[in-house]
Image (tube, rainbow, N blue to C red):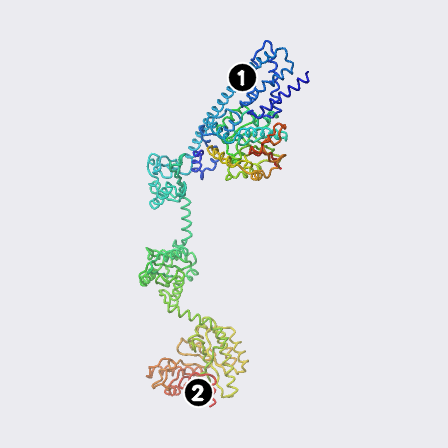
Amino acid sequence: MIREGTGVREGFTHGWAKAVAGLSYLPVGVDEARRQLTPITEELLAALRSEPFTAAPGHRLGERLVHLNFTDTAALRASLEWFGAPLLELAAADGLDLVDRETLGARLADLRAAFAAGYADGLRDRTRAEQETISRAVLMARDHAEQALRSSEARFRAVFETSAIGIGIGDLKGRVTDANSALLDMLGVPLAELRGRSITEFVHPDDVASVRRAQRELLTGGNGDHVRLDRRFYREHGQVLWTHLTLSLIRDDHGAPRYQVAMLEDDTERHLLQTRLRYQALHDPLTGLPNRALFLERMEQAFAAAPVDGRIGLCYLDLDGFKVINDSLGHHLGDQLLRAVGTRLDRCVSGPNRLVARMGGDEFVILVERTGNTDEVVAVADRVLAALVEPIRIGGHELAITGSIGVVERAVDGTVPAELMRDADITLYWAKGEGKGRWALFDPDRTAREVARFTLSTTMPAALERGEFRLDYQPLVRLRDGVVVGVEALIRWHHPELGTLAPNEFIALAEETGTIVPLGRWVLTEACRQAREWYDLLGDRAPFVSVNLAVRQLGDPGLVDDVRRILDEAGLAPGRLQLELTESAVMTQVDEALGALRALADMGVRIAIDDFGTGYSNLAYLRRLPVHELKIAGSFVEGLRDDVPADGGESCAGTSGAARPDPVDQQIVAALVSLAHTLRLTVTAEGVETSAQAYKLRALGCDHAQGWFYAKPAAADEVTRGMTS
Amino acid sequence: MRQSAGGVRRCVMSRTLSVVENAQWVPGEVDVRRPSVARVYDYYLGGSHNFEADREMARRVIEMSPNAVPVARANRAFLRRAVRFCMDAGIRQFLDIGSGIPTVGNVHDVAQQLDPSARVVYVDIDPIAVAHSRAILEGNPNATVIQADLRDPAAILAHPECVRLLDLDRPVAVLLVSVMHFVADSDDPAGIVGHLAGAVVPDSHLVFSQATLDGAPAVKVNSAKELYSRTDTQLTMRSREDIENMLAGWDLVEPGLTYLSWWRPESPDDVDPDAPRSVFLAAVGRKP
């Protein structure tokens, strides 16, 4: 009976649990639902059984179902279904036969009604409670939000007030409605004065347009809600305030613009520092003048800004002899001098379209923009030279200083800054070369010539190797009997493009570049070889060779050894070689040259002084020098002529025309011959072109003569033919 | 627009005062005329923590997809089973993100019934749900609620309440139950899950469920999306594959990713044979 009752009970609760599980607010499994429903089942059975019967527990149990979270009314419906036949069956199985079936049915109906009412009451209470909770939650949430808003506003206010950044809030027309103390400090105005005014009133005039434009763009919303700019403002007393400016647009909840916010970060200090750094980077600390960097920058700008037909000029100034002042009086004084020169230049030149810069050392450069013609720049150069005339007083010294200036002026079109600089620099060296303390004007032809010369000088060593040089020989004739005693070797360059070049076209160049040393060595070698050939051919009748020696060769410490080796190799007796030196070559380096000359003379080589009478001879030295012969310059010999040149052609010296005898020249020649003989030297007259000259020279006692009257310079085999015929 | 008030200030101040960024800004507008996901869910469960706007929306969803109510309950039941599972695994810390209206039988109820020292942090974006939770949790020293956005997990983990209650050097159960479908793909849901995974120590657990595309008729999906777009949240249903990718990095415990009622049912009676129609997948993962 009990077992049967237990089984029916379990079947009932399991079925009921299955019907309501999943219908609870807090979902529970069937097992848990059964555990929860079992006591209710027991109480229901107890209520049915109660005497006297009361349905009150049903109400309570209905409420309990709600408490167990079965808030879905489907759970009530299912429960009431289970309280029908299934519960009656359970009650029967439980031995509830104390009451008759009819009474049981009535009790069950009462109980179900009470259960339903209880459930409804429970659900109503719960619903009210939950509605109340959620409403309270809404209030709390609003409260919290307001609180957060308040504290957020307080926080914002604190940030606004204490921020180091100036913040201004304005309406859509840009009128300031509020500003923080940082902004008021920056602009130096009280809030009352700022309110209602536009922030642009404080913007630097040059920047107003761009700030207005930024505001407009912000409002039309093209480029987002923020704009960042670096702009200048004015603070009180007109001081300039450099700022990073951020303009922002604030929109309302619907996205419509409401406010503008301007934030200003004071950038003045950084800006000033940057300006100073830039100034330092672009100025010469000694003179305060613009430096090379700024100068080049300005020149680039000038080129860029020049009109199509614009012209531009440059003066490149270098102080003359500054190094001497620096070395002798000290760098400190030199610096002061440079500073003084810088000041004078600045005063006399600087102005619109003129810029003076120090390029370094004692070099200054003046840029003259928008020139009309070259004279304008020459005038600037003249002013500069004039400004330097007055001696400069420094530390008790009166320093007279001059400068040399290279001047360039030309159309901007067709030139570039670097070219202008280079040409001014070249021209400066012309001014130096022409004697300093002056300006020189750039001359493109001169540059072209110099370039050509330079090109020639660089190709000379290769030409020597290629055998482009040849020697011609001009006989030296003994006046007494007309016998050829020697020949002077004269170098020719058979240039593949320029034709035959005479020594005056390239020897000076070779001297400059140093090519003269190998070239001179070649001449010696070739001349000695030829002399030996003649000796082999003519024996004692063979002529000696006279070879010109350049200044540079005389200074070459290897000269003596070279000569000795060359003579050895040629197998030529030293007495058959004569070396010709100019007066000045010997006199300018007399100490260095003396040893070499002695050694050569000791060796037996003849030494001749070329072009005697044209330089400044120190006769005392002349006496000490191991010299064997003087060659009288052709210019004196010219004064001896009184007839037409022998061959009627052009004169060798290129000074045709003066065909009248000059008595002074005659006396000079006589004196020179006499002087030479006094010093026991033989004398050769150069440039003899007429028989009258030859006659007079012989009469004056001159030993030898050379010139077109006797023979033009000619190739070796032609000379050979002449001597053997 | 909900964040406009805070948003503006954030812009204005952004450059100068990044420190203020971390402070709590004004919570979103409290507007009961707009339905809230949390209160609609409460309605599905049979609760009365809701307003007419919520009920109106809930009724329309139910009309379209009568499954909504059983799915909500199934989710609730899954949450309960999963919390118990975590308790059995020895976890005593819970971070329930997207907790909604936490009435009876919530995480702290389930966990603290088994161990009163268990700690729970609820997180929701809805200010009313948060206020409600706060009222319920008053006097409970081991449970708290914070208002935060799931899309900013770093802010959640750094929240003072979270720091106070959770010891991240010990395992934590992170709950993302029925919430990730409110995170759009553009908000990098996998990144959010990954961030949370990276913040917890091994043996921590993830309790996860979300709406899936699999088995859902397209029309209904679209209508539901349309409805949810009226709330502050968008609905993003995801394929099983997408969800699996999101859970990469977690060792899913048996039975892996499955339908809500099929995940470790307590009795055979609880298994819903129609579960695939629930268009919801659930899983619990353990951090290796």
Name the residue at 53% across, 22% down: A73
Q: Quadrant of the N terminus of chain A?
A: top right
Q: Position of residue A189 (x, y in %)?
A: 34, 37
Inspect the image, locate mark 2, and give the three-letter code of the amino acid beneath it. Answer: Arg
Chain ID at mark 1: A
In the image, which disc is placed on residue A118? 1
- Examine the rendering and report whether any part of residue A226 can be seen: yes
In the image, which disc is placed on residue A478? 2
Q: CA distance from mark 1 to mark 2?
A: 165 Å
Which is nearer the N-term, disc 1 or disc 2? 1
Mark 1 element type: helix
In the image, which disc is placed on residue A27? none
Inspect the image, locate mark 1, and give the three-letter code of the amino acid beneath it. Answer: Gly
Residue occupying the far front of the picture: A102
Neighbours of disc 2 within 10 Å: few (<14), some (14-19), many (20+): some
Mark 2 element type: strand
